[in-house]
């Protein structure tokens, strides 16, 4: 707001939101006044899921092959005593027993987080590759190998961030182009995405500016 009374800024809120109390403050630095208001920000409660899985990365093919060879599945003389249902149950029981020792079943509790709409298969694979290189860099004890692994991880991290920026910009550019003829639908789409996105991330002004200047 200007010192001479001309409004320069407007505080806009949703119809179902609590009306904000706006304070007009003269900070004494210029002829522009400062607007201050409170915004209730409530973070949604995290949603946790429980899954049962095995650590397949620790699978040793030689150990599994040895245990499988010693099981009833590799002794045909024991099969006739089972009917069809019994053979199916035998198969399930023996495979489970073979796997339970080297890679037992574990219960993992994880927090479900919504994904960005531009998070596609290419982005997902790049993220996994970056994490694999990070784990390799952190677990390597040899000095020379650790330096090489760290360099690969840092390079891939830059690639991953560049891909993230490209996906972000391509998504919003396509969204703007598709709804350019209807500003109402465009702002409705933007409002829906930002409302769903506000609980987990903040869109930086640099990204918005990069999209605006590229148009």
Image: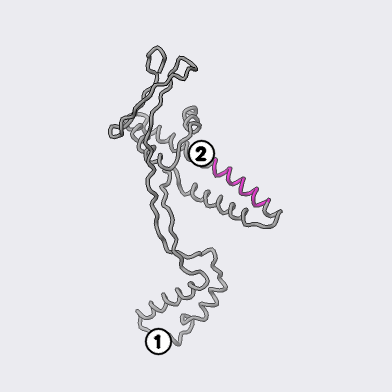
User: Does residue 39 appear to the left or right of 71 in the view shown?
Assistant: left
Pointer 1 with pointer 2, Cβ within 8 A: no
* Nearer to me, 54 or 74: 54
Q: Residue at x 68, y 51 (%)?
A: 147
Which residues lie in the magenta part? 147-161
Main SS, magenta region, reads helix
The residue that mark 2 highlights is 165
Residue at far top of view: 4
Question: Is 158 included in the stretch rendered in magenta?
Answer: yes
SS label for mark 1: loop
Q: Nearer the viewer, mark 1 or mark 2?
A: 2
Residue 109: numbered disc? none
Question: Is 28 included in the stretch rendered in magenta?
Answer: no
Q: CA distance from mark 1 to mark 2?
A: 62 Å
SS label for mark 2: helix
Instruction: Give coordinates of residue 146: x percent, y percent.
Output: 67, 53
104 to 178, vertically: above or below:
below
Residue 80: numbered disc? 1
Residue at far right of view: 144
């Amino acid at each position: 707001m200007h010192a001479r009374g001309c409004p320069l800024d407007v505080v806009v809120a949703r119809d179902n939101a609590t009306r904000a109390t706006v304070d007009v403050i003269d900070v004494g630095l210029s002829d522009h006044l400062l607007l201050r208001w409170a915004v209730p920000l409530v973070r949604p409660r995290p949603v946790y899921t429980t899954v049962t899985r095995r650590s397949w990365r620790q699978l040793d093919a030689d150990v599994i092959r040895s245990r499988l060879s010693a099981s009833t599945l590799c002794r045909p003389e024991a099969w006739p005593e089972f009917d069809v249902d019994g053979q199916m149950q035998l198969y399930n029981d023996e495979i489970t027993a073979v796997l339970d020792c080297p890679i037992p079943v574990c219960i993992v509790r994880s927090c479900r987080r919504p994904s960005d709409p531009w998070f596609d298969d290419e982005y997902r694979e790049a993220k996994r590759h970056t994490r694999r290189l990070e784990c390799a860099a952190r677990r390597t004890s040899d000095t020379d190998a650790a330096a090489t692994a760290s360099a690969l991880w840092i390079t891939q991290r830059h690639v991953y961030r560049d891909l993230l920026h490209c996906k972000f910009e391509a998504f919003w550019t396509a969204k703007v182009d598709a709804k350019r003829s209807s500003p109402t639908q465009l702002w409705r789409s933007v409002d829906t995405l930002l409302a769903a996105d506000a609980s987990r991330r903040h869109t930086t002004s640099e990204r918005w500016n990069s999209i605006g200047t590229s148009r």
